[in-house]
Amino acid sequence: MPILDENRLFPTDPTVRALARDLYEAIKDLPIISPHGHTDPRWFAEDAAFPDPAQLLVTPDHYLFRMLHSQGIALEDLGVPRIDGGAIEQDSRKIWRLFAANYHLFRGTPSRIWVDHALQEVFGVDERLSAASADAIYEHIDASLKTDAFRPRALFERFNIEAISTTESAIDDLKWHKIIRDSGWNGKVVTAYRPDAVIDPDFDGFADNVANMGEMAGEDATTWEGYLAAHRNRRAFFKSFGATSSDHGHPTARTEDLPKAEAAALFDKAIRGKCSPEEADRFRGHMLTEMARMSLDDGLVMQIHPGAVRNHSASVLARFGRDKGYDIPSRTDYVTALRPLLDAVGSEAGLTLIVFTLDESSYTRELAPLAGVYPALRLGPPWWFHDSYEGMIRFRKMATETAGFYNTVGFNDDTRAFCSIPARHDVARRVDCSFLATLVETGRLDRDEAPEVARDLTYRLAKQAYKL
């Protein structure tokens, strides 16, 4: 018996549902363009078998372990590694049983759809996960993972992934990407330039990171000119491994366009650890504009992911490190914050600036109007907490009337959980087809236009925007 409802996420009105299904059937098997994410390039480099169901599906996925943790389950009991090497659960079967016994916590969430999709469509499981079914499902998945058909490259090809981008720090040596490139495998796995560690004065070890970048680039990065030259060098290095984009995760969307002397003085204070919080934010803002200018030179698409209060729990950060589910959305200004950058380069046809948000109130008021007029600006898809049915529907409703479809960039899955990639893209395809069917049935889109828009949202816009 299938776990998934074949009509999931489609409208309940029979006429609209029928059209949505027709649109979906025409695009559901298109190749996946995954232009931004956090899968591990080592998987594709070594092509080693995934170790077990818990380490594949539970331990690396903050969407899952944050929900379990919210109900009092210790991260250690889910096998999440501690910074100090302290004791954590090592028995993957126990971790899986704990997850299965608490699977009811995910009712009504996107995570439930993603996991059910992976169980049914990837592993052929036809029974709902529960405490009673946990062992049988574990054994079935574990046996599958021991076969060649479930190694990373085989799954990559089975998922029909045309291109995927990982995300690496500016001071990463990209050794796994080199192994992929040299292996002769034809799967398209590219990197993306993430310079937060060498742009944010509040990042742990900022000065050492900058020095490391300078050494890797062969530049004296302790000087302002040498620092900028080091960025250019590293961006070129990333491009040599297929990078088509840079990615910037800042606390705010603030940008600045400072005189050279003022920027250099701020940089000097940052290197010496003397920046006030305001000065650190000002420096980050100026570096976004510098990165945009570099994108005009080297062609990298620029992504800005602002508006998350990172590592909200100091104790969890101290014990487990970054990216452990404690990043919380915050209110974000875009109209004022982006203006210095947009004044400088926003009308440049050679720049693509993709902006994401966790503040949905900004779609109609700020982001859609901005993207609807500045040639360089595009809206990223619903991201993180809004990578969901409701989040995607709200995005289309709030952004389309002002920005249209063609100032958006399709979908990206932004995931660390490899087996959730086809699930997430399937959700996006179903939601977009449902939205288009509603437009058609309410007279806002011609019926013969809807299939082309569906294909654009599913495939062409992401491929075009990210130059893949």
Image (cartoon, rainbow, N blue to C red):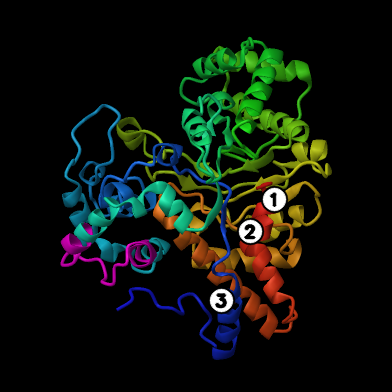
Give the residue type at disc 1: Ala
CA distance separating discs 2 and 3 = 18 Å
Q: Position of residue 90 (x, y in %)?
A: 18, 40
Secondary element at tag 3: helix
- 185 to the left or right of 235: left
Give me the disc on residue 25: 3
Q: Quadrant of residue 223?
A: top right
- In front: label 2 or label 3: 3
Sequence-first disc among 1 and 2: 2
Q: List x then y, in percent, for residue 430.
A: 54, 71
In this picture, residue 382 sits left or right of residue 317 = right
Q: Which residue is mark 1?
A: 465
Q: Is residue 222 left or right of residue 99?
A: right
Q: Which residues are magenta?
A: 115-138
Q: Residue at x 44, y 37 (%)?
A: 45
CB atoms of marks 1 and 2 within 8 Å: yes
Q: Residues within 10 Å of mark 2 (few under 14, many from 20)?
A: many
Mark pair 1, 3: CA separation: 24 Å
Residues at circles 2 and 3 in contact by the CB criterion of under 8 Å: no
119 vs 320, nearest the viewer: 119
Tag 2's secondary structure?
Answer: loop
Among numbered discs 2 and 3, the one appearing first in the sequence: 3
Q: In which quadrant of the rendered view does residue 138 lie? A: bottom left
> Which amino acid type is marked by label 3?
Glu
In this orientation, which residue lies closer to the viewer: 236 or 436?
Answer: 236
Which quadrant of the figure has residue 215? top right
Is residue 132 located in the magenta-colored stretch of the structure?
Answer: yes
The residue pinned by badge 2 equals 410
Out of 441 and 146, give the one closest to the viewer.
Answer: 146
Check disc 1: other Cα within 10 Å, few if <14, some if 14-19, many if 20+: many
Name the front one of labels 1 and 3.
3
